[in-house]
Image: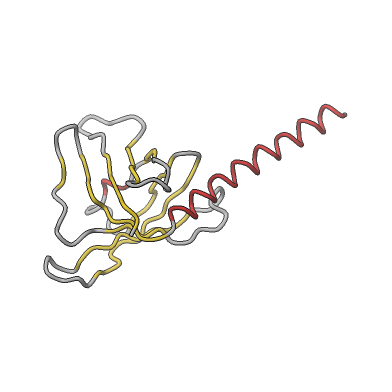
């Protein structure tokens, strides 16, 4: 009986530790991040416009169990500093993986709808690197962001 109690106690401690880690990550991600670089292959980079695209990570409570929200913002045109929240994204956090699971405008931003491993959000730049199996024709995407 003591062994079962001890095992249950340890399981609860591990679960609480995992929950705390995801919440700390969600808290560190919260805010506006400017996309500074998108690399599609070892040699192919996407030219970023003069006016930056940003990802705004919304506050997220219970990050271990909840699906969180982010917003992709970009200028209305090349000369405007007026931004539109053009796409609402959903994402999940597990350990050092961030998975974007849904987007309103999937055809335009499908490069985001993947699972990424990421660097420490307290470091700059934040680096998202696509992980998992690559289908034929898919690229190992890397995205670099800095917090504004």
Seen at 42% across and 44% down, the residue is 98
**Residue 63, position in %: x, y?**
53, 52
Q: Position of residue 56 (x, y in %)?
A: 36, 60
Q: Is residue 50 left or right of residue 119?
A: left
Q: 146 or 40, which is in the foreground?
A: 146
Q: Residue at x 76, y 30 (%)?
A: 7
Residue 29 or 11: which is nearer the viewer?
Answer: 29
- Give the answer, above or below, for where 38 lies relative to 83: above
Q: Residue furthest top?
A: 3
Q: Quadrant of the N terminus?
A: top right
Is residue 27 shown above or below 138? Answer: below
| Colouring | secondary structure
Which residue of the protein is positioned furthest toward the front in this rendering? 123
Indicate the quadrant containing the C terminus: top left, top right, bottom left or bottom right: bottom left
Numbered circles on residues, count: 0
The reply, left or right, for residue 75 in relation to residue 85 is left
* Left or right of residue 42, residue 16 in this image: right
Is residue 101 depicted above or below 9 in this figure?
below
Quadrant of the image occupied by residue 50: bottom left
Residue that appears at 71% across and 40% down:
12
Q: Quadrant of residue 33?
A: bottom left
- Horizontal and vertical percent for residue 136? 23, 29
* Residue 71 horizontal/vertical position (percent): 35, 61
């Amino acid at each position: 009986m003591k062994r079962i109690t001890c095992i249950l106690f340890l399981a609860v401690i591990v679960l609480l530790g995992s929950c705390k880690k995801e919440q700390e990550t969600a808290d560190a991600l919260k805010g506006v991040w400017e996309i500074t670089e998108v690399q599609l292959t070892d040699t192919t980079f996407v030219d970023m416009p003069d006016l930056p695209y940003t990802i705004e990570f919304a506050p997220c409570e219970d990050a271990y169990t909840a699906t969180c929200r982010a917003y992709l913002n970009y200028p209305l045109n090349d000369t405007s500093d007026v931004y539109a929240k053009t796409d609402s994204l959903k994402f999940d956090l597990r350990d050092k993986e961030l998975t974007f699971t849904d987007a309103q405008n999937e055809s335009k931003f499908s490069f985001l709808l993947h699972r990424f491993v990421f660097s420490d959000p307290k470091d700059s730049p934040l680096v998202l690197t696509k992980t998992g199996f690559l289908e034929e024709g898919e690229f190992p995407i890397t995205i670099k962001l800095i917090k504004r």
